[in-house]
Structures are given as structure tokens and as C-alpha cells.
């Protein structure tokens, strides 16, 4: 890679470094924002953890930086970033079609499609590709999302039409 290319990448990273995401979600309309930011995030089965004594469900997501994509931009640089997600007040966890890391003895990655919230049932559902879902029963909605690394360039943008 040439020095010019490296300098260009560093300029792009510096431009987006100040846009680090750190959000707290306590209302259903906040969840729409969090869900849209996490859409198309890659989550490993080894990175999903229920901390029962702390009533907390945690995971690390390799999220696509939708917040820096614009249709009118001539700059076709895309980015991903590692983000930590902490869902508080979790009383129970149920899952469908999720292969645990220990069971598979290998890391599997799922594409996070959306996060849904049913306020009547106090259920937060993480909906993944491959018909995988994780349902969390919560006493109240309280989710933290924070970028935990610097964004890095990627040439691929998720495509919802293929």
C-alpha cells in the first residue's frame, strides 16, 4: 500500500473519529435509533453473554457505520466499528436456533437485522439472520450502545436487495 493511500485512509478515519457513538436507550423511540445503528452488525456466537447476577445481557458487534453514509456523497468510503451493547434489567433469556460457542466449538457469526421491543410483554428481541433470535425479558428498557474502537475502512456496504 502506498504512503498516499495510507495518508488518505488516516484522513478519513480522523474525520470520523469524532463521531464515536455512545447512546443510552430507555424509551421505545430511542430503540429505533439503536436498532438502525446496529442494523447489519456482525455478532459472533462467542460474543453473546448473559450476566445473570448483574441482570445484564452483553455483546460486541462489528457494526456498519450507517451514520456516515449519504446518498449524495462522492466519497464512497465505508466504515465498520466494534461496538459494545449492554442490555440492563434482564430477568430471563430465551433463544431460537442459536448455536452456542461451546456447543459448536467454533465461532459462528450472525447478521443482526433488527431489535424489537414489545412494551406490553417487556420483551426485547434481537433478530438475526439464519432465523436466529434472542428474546430478553426485561423489567424495564435500558440499553447502552458504545463504540469501543476506532472505525476502520471497508469496501463493502450491506446490500438489502440481493
Image (cartoon, grey):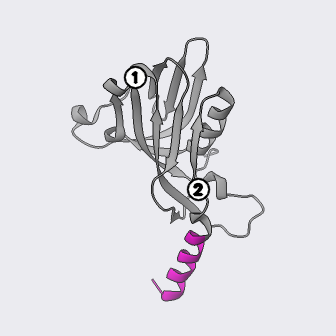
Name the residue that disc number 1 marks: 95
Residue at (50% x, 17% y) in the render? 139
Whether 56 is drawn above or below 10: the answer is above
User: Please, is residue 139 above or below residue 129 in the view?
Assistant: above
Disc number placed over residue 16 in the picture, else none: none
Determine whether the residue tagged by mark 2 lies in a helix, strand or loop. loop
Left-right relation of 77 to 112 = right
Residue 51 drawn at (x, y percent): 33, 29
Q: 10 Å neighbourhood of mark 1: few (<14), some, or many (≥20)?
A: few
Label 1: element kind: strand
* Gap in angstroms between the C-alphas marked 2 and 1: 28 Å
Residue range of the region highlighted in magenta in the rendering: 1-14
- Residue 96 image position (x, y, % from top left): 41, 22
- Residue 160 quadrant: top right
Disc 2 packing (10 Å; few <14; some 14–19; many ≥20):
some
Which residue in the protein does label 2 denote? 157
Q: Is residue 39 visible?
A: no
Amino acid at each position: 500500500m502506498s504512503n498516499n493511500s495510507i495518508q488518505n485512509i488516516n484522513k478519513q478515519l480522523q474525520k470520523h473519529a469524532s463521531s464515536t457513538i455512545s447512546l443510552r436507550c430507555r424509551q421505545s423511540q430511542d430503540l429505533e435509533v439503536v436498532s438502525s445503528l446496529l442494523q447489519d452488525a456482525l455478532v459472533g456466537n462467542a460474543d453473546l453473554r448473559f450476566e445473570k447476577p448483574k441482570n445484564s445481557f452483553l455483546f460486541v458487534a462489528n457494526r456498519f457505520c450507517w451514520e456516515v453514509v449519504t446518498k449524495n456523497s462522492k466519497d464512497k468510503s465505508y466504515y465498520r466499528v466494534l461496538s459494545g451493547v449492554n442490555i440492563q434489567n434482564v430477568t430471563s433469556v430465551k433463544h431460537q436456533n442459536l448455536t452456542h460457542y461451546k456447543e459448536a466449538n467454533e465461532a459462528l457469526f450472525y447478521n443482526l437485522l433488527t431489535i424489537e421491543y414489545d412494551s406490553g410483554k417487556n420483551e426485547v428481541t434481537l433478530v438475526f439472520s439464519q432465523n436466529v433470535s434472542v428474546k430478553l425479558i426485561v423489567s424495564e428498557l435500558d440499553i447502552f450502545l458504545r463504540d469501543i474502537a476506532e472505525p476502520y475502512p471497508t469496501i463493502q456496504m450491506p446490500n438489502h436487495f440481493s
